[in-house]
């Protein structure tokens, strides 16, 4: 009997903001551990989240670029689970009312596909893309473990696909196209080295021709597209082998061991009710207004695939040349300035791709210096306008920790949060839309663990005989 794979992907993408999702800490990579943290992203008692409006805009922009619907109302929920790297013991995410619903990604792919988009290319439909926060990162050393919370609270877009993918190669092509769209649109840098894109893979196999899906097996936390491809190749072969032996597959979560090249079972899968989702009482629902949406729409750019096809159609370029101009936006824009004035646009492309690029390589000119940069309008309103009922006490409560206070001062009393409600301008984020906290004024909350000397862990006394309780 022949089997076929059914694959869906959950892609987590860090948004390109300067500050985190619920506080003013910088969204930056590579700082010493636990130096980009504050009471809000550490989940300390008495703090309240304040949304980063640029992250809300980027989520809506991603929805538009991915052909999704933006519902008139979205909401944040709490997803409860415990991991050492999640300071609040719950994650603020979107559950039944996400910021974007539906959508699709069309891409070039030669293999068999189940869906084709409106332009005739293979297509993967999207279920939703919702906004949530990233968690910290655990590090395991020889004698102890440490947690770096610098990443905790970074805005994260989770893009969930329908199970339209049929092979590891198709998954790779889809992810590449998705990354191109988000990078071109300015939604994320999608830098794999910095962990800005991570994937969870859902894969099942079924006999060819059957409509019923097999047991869904999830592979968590794949941090490169090639790892997605290799993990899928292994897992599909493993599942088919189990079924051929007459075995049974159960819904479960596995992890990919890159070094060994195998997947290993972590746990049988939780259901949604295990997470105890409920609406976050600290956050108002989102109801984007027409002006706000118009501003986001003004930031929509031409999709990479559409740009490539247009270069091929309008200027008669071969696919290879158009591909270069698709990937190097500045170079493509430069070509577009010259091409309409040329009798043979192809000759212009040849000159740019051969002579000009060679000359630029000689002079070691940086790619950014090539031709005009793509200009994107960024009219950023001075204050958030997306929150409904702005007059209510909750939405105008600009809770924040005043880092300009003398170092080691006590935390403001809860009432201080309410008296400081007044002006949005009191929060730096609000005035400049998305600015990192003024770091100079901020005393480090405590010594970063990298420089702290850890006490030796006493050796456990050896016990003989049966264990006793209480000891
Ligand atoms: Zn923070």
Image (spheres, rainbow, N blue to C red):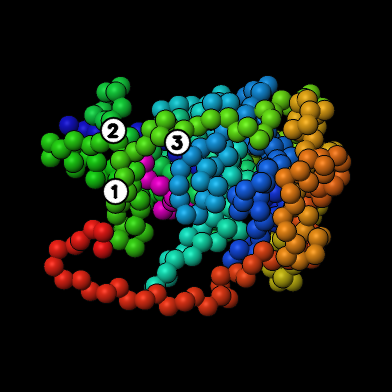
Question: In the rendered view, does 174 fall on the left or right side of 382?
Answer: left
- Choose top left, top right, bottom left or bottom right for residue 237: top left
Task: Report how far apart the C-alphas of labels 1 and 3 lie in the structure.
Answer: 20 Å
Q: Residue at x 55, y 47 (%)?
A: 88
Residue on which the image places disc 3 = 275
Q: Nearer the viewer, residue 363 or 400?
A: 400
Tell me if residue 464 comes above or below residue 6 in the rendering.
Answer: below
Task: Report how far apart the C-alphas of labels 1 and 2 lie in the structure.
Answer: 14 Å
Q: Is residue 208 magenta?
A: no
Q: Secondary structure at mark 2?
A: loop
Marks 3 and 2: which is nearer the front? Answer: 3
Q: Residue at x 78, y 46 (%)?
A: 416
x, y percent for residue 354:
67, 60
Tell me if residue 385 comes above or below residue 363 in the rendering.
Answer: above
Q: Residues within 10 Å of mark 1 (few under 14, many from 20)?
A: few
Mark closer to the chain start, 1 or 2: 2
> The magenta stretch spans which residues?
217-227
Looking at the image, which residue sits at the far front? Answer: 470
Residue on which the image places disc 1 = 265
Residue on which the image places disc 2 = 215
Mark closer to the chain start, 1 or 3: 1
Q: Residues within 10 Å of mark 3 (few under 14, many from 20)?
A: some
Q: Residue at x 33, y 34 (%)?
A: 216
Tell me if residue 72 comes above or below residue 176 in the rendering.
Answer: above
Q: Quadrant of the C terminus?
A: bottom left
x, y percent for residue 255:
35, 51
Q: Secondary structure at mark 1?
A: strand
Residue 369 visible within the image: no
Residues at marks 1 and 2 touching, judged by CB atoms closer than 8 Å: no
């Amino acid at each position: 009997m022949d089997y076929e794979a059914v694959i869906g992907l959950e892609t987590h993408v860090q948004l390109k903001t300067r500050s985190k999702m619920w506080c003013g800490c910088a969204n930056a990579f590579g700082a010493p551990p636990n130096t980009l943290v504050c009471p809000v992203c550490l989940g300390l008692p008495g703090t309240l989240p304040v949304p980063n409006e640029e992250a809300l805009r980027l989520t809506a922009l991603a929805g538009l670029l991915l052909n999704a619907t933006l519902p008139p109302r979205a909401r944040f929920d709490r997803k409860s689970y415990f991991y050492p790297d999640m300071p609040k013991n719950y994650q603020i995410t979107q559950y039944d009312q996400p910021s974007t619903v539906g959508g699709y990604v069309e891409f070039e792919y030669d293999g068999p596909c189940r869906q084709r988009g409106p332009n005739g290319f293979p297509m993967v439909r999207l279920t939703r893309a919702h906004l949530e926060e990233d968690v910290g990162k655990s590090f395991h050393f020889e004698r102890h473990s440490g947690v770096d919370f610098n990443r905790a609270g970074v805005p994260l877009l989770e893009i969930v696909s329908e199970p339209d993918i049929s092979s590891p190669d198709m998954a790779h092509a889809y992810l590449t196209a998705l990354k191109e769209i988000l990078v071109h649109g300015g939604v994320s840098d999608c830098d794999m080295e910095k962990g800005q894109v991570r994937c969870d893979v859902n894969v099942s196999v079924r006999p060819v021709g059957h409509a019923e899906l097999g047991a869904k097996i999830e592979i968590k936390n794949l941090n490169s597209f090639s790892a997605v491809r290799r993990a899928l190749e292994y897992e599909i072969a493993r599942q088919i082998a189990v079924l051929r032996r007459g075995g049974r597959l159960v819904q479960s979560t596995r992890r990919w061991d890159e070094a060994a090249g195998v997947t290993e079972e972590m746990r049988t899968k939780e259901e949604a009710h295990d997470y105890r989702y409920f609406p976050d009482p600290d956050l108002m629902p989102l109801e984007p207004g027409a002006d706000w949406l118009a501003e986001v729409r003004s930031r929509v750019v031409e999709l990479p695939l559409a740009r490539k096809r247009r270069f091929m159609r309008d200027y008669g370029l071969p696919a290879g040349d158009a591909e270069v101009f698709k990937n190097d936006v500045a170079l493509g824009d430069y070509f577009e300035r010259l091409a309409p004035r040329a009798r043979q646009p192809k000759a212009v492309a040849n000159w740019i791709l051969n002579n000009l690029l060679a000359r630029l390589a000689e002079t070691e000119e940086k790619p950014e210096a090539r031709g005009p940069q793509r200009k994107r309008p960024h009219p950023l309103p001075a204050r958030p306008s997306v929150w409904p009922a702005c007059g209510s006490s909750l939405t105008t409560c600009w809770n924040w920790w005043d880092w300009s206070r003398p170092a080691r001062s006590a935390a403001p009393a809860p009432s201080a949060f309410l008296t400081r409600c007044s002006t949005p301008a009191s929060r730096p984020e609000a005035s400049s839309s998305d600015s990192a906290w003024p770091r100079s004024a901020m005393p480090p909350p405590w010594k970063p663990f990298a420089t702290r000397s850890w006490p030796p862990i006493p050796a456990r006394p050896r016990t003989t005989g049966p264990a006793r309780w209480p000891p």
